[in-house]
Structure formats: structure tokens, C-alpha cells
Amino acid sequence: MASILEVNSVSKRFGGVVALEEVTLSVPERGIVGLIGPNGSGKTTLFNVVTGFHVPDKGEVWFRNQGGMERIDGLNPNEVFAKGIVRTFQVPRLFKNLTVLENLLVTPWNQLGERPLAALRRGWEREERELARRAIELLRRFDLLPYANTRVSELSAAHIKLVETVRGLMTPARLYLLDEPAAGVEAGVAHRLFSLVRELREREGLTFFIVEHRIEILTRYVDYLYVLHNGKLLAEGKPEEVISDPRVVEAYIGGG
């Protein structure tokens, strides 16, 4: 399967701290790829480089569009988003004064109703209905429908984390980067979330790159797994092979 994302020899420093050092990895189209590692290993920094929040000091990031692979490192986050890459955040960034449903509905980019001229025509109504249908379906799947009209500021931390992930799935992207989607979420709900990820891959041909600390859940759903440790790629392969690798066991036991 051709790669949709390629990270080639990427390095990133913050002052004297080496966050990433010569990291090379790829994500195949329609793949579900996991990224694990101890705290401070560089996982979120890598996501930030891919999505334009950080510019790498060295290396390249390539993304496949309709015309082939295109270099995207150095683009602004909004430009990366427009290419078809959506990410969620380890610390949710929701509109706290909007309701859960409103947070989902404002997320998709370039809606017809947001264009002054297009808004004067009737086509935007069909798009609005379709977005509402998708939002309601996602909320129903995660037992969030009773909170649809609740302001985000009134939700528990676990519900806020879940809404952040569901909001990311509202956008018609080709590659989704999920940063710890199961953090603070009850195990049964986490399994439903990852089951939906598989369903979206099969039904809509989507691709997922997922950072997750709950390895016992993640490894049941990903096709391939990468491990970062102290900013370097420590191991990669099938999940069952990686988690039994002595180097990976030592990195987690040692605290990295």
C-alpha cells in the first residue's frame, strides 16, 4: 500500500533539549498506525511538526494528494488542514461557551454557508442537514447525544476529551492524527471509539495515525506500531512483536 504520509530524518530541538532526532517513519493509505513511547519521548512534538505547529530543524514531511507526494513541512497549520490532515490535541481545544453540537457543526472547513455569495443560494441547506446528521450519529455512537445542547464548560474532563476526538471525525479529511483519544475515557467507550476508527477506515477509506498511552487498548486495533524513546525511533513493526521487544519493555520500565 502506498504511503499517505512520510516523515524523513526529522529532528527538532528546543534550546538544548533534543525533542526529535533523525525520525523516519511512514503511514500507508487506509492504515491505522500507532505511536507509543514514555512521557517526553517526542510523540506530540512529532504530531506538531506534521501539522505545522513546529518547523523541523532538519528533515522533511511529505503528504500524498491527488497529484502525488507533496512536501508540507513549513506550512502553516491552516494550510496543512486544507490539504486534508486533521489532528486532535492531548489537551482539548474546544469552544467552551458553545454547546457540544455547535462545536461539531463549526468544525468542517469551507462550508457553503460561510461563503457570502453561496449563502444566498439554497445549496448550503443540504450541506447543513448532512453535517447535522453526521454529528448526531457520532454523538449517538458515544452516548453523548444527551449532552448535545450542553455547553462544553459544563462537561466533565472525560466528556470534554471525548468530544474533542469526535469533533475531529466531523471533518472530511484523508488523514487523522489522534493524540491520546482514550485518555481519561472509560474502557468500554475507548473500545467503541477504536472500533469506529476501523469502521471509518473500511467504509470511507480513511487513514489514522494515533498516539496513545493505553497500549493494551491501542494494540488491539492498529496495523503497525512505532515506538519513540528520548526523541529517537526505538522500534517498529506488528503490535504483538513491538510490545514484546526487550528494548521497548526496558524503555517503559525505566520510565524513559
Image (cartoon, rainbow, N blue to C red):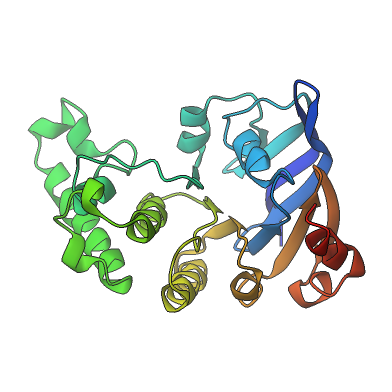
| Residue shown at the point (38%, 51%) measured from the top left | 164
Q: Is residue 237 above or below residue 95?
A: below
The answer to which quarter of the image holds residue 8 is: top right
Q: Would you say 107 lies left or right of 237 here?
A: left
Report the residue that reaches farthest toward the right. 246
User: Is 133 above or below relative to 152?
Assistant: below
The residue sitting at 51% across, 60% down in the picture is 206
- How far across and how far down the image is residue 148, in percent? 18, 59
Q: Picture quarter containing residue 22? A: top right
Which of 243 and 71 lies nearest the eye of the viewer?
243
Please state if 195 lies on the left or on the right of 144 as rendered. Answer: right
- Residue 15 left/right relative to 44: right
| Vertical relation: 140 (above or below) 181 | below
Query: Percent x, y for residue 161?
Result: 40, 55
- The answer to whether 250 is drawn above or below residue 84 in the figure is below
Taking the view exactly as shown, the residue that stands out farthest to the top is: 15
- Of residues 125 and 58, the one nearer the viewer is 58
Image-based side of 182 in relation to 167, left or right: right
**Position of residue 244 measured from the top left corner of the image (x, y, whole percent):** 84, 75
**Count of all numbered marks drawn on residues in the image:** 0
Residue closest to the eye, 117 or 47: 47
Quadrant for the N terminus, please. Answer: bottom right
Residue 168 rendering spot, x and y as whole percentages:
41, 51
Q: Spot the residue most to the front.
A: 254
Residue lying at 28% horizontally and 39% vertically, measured from the top left: 95
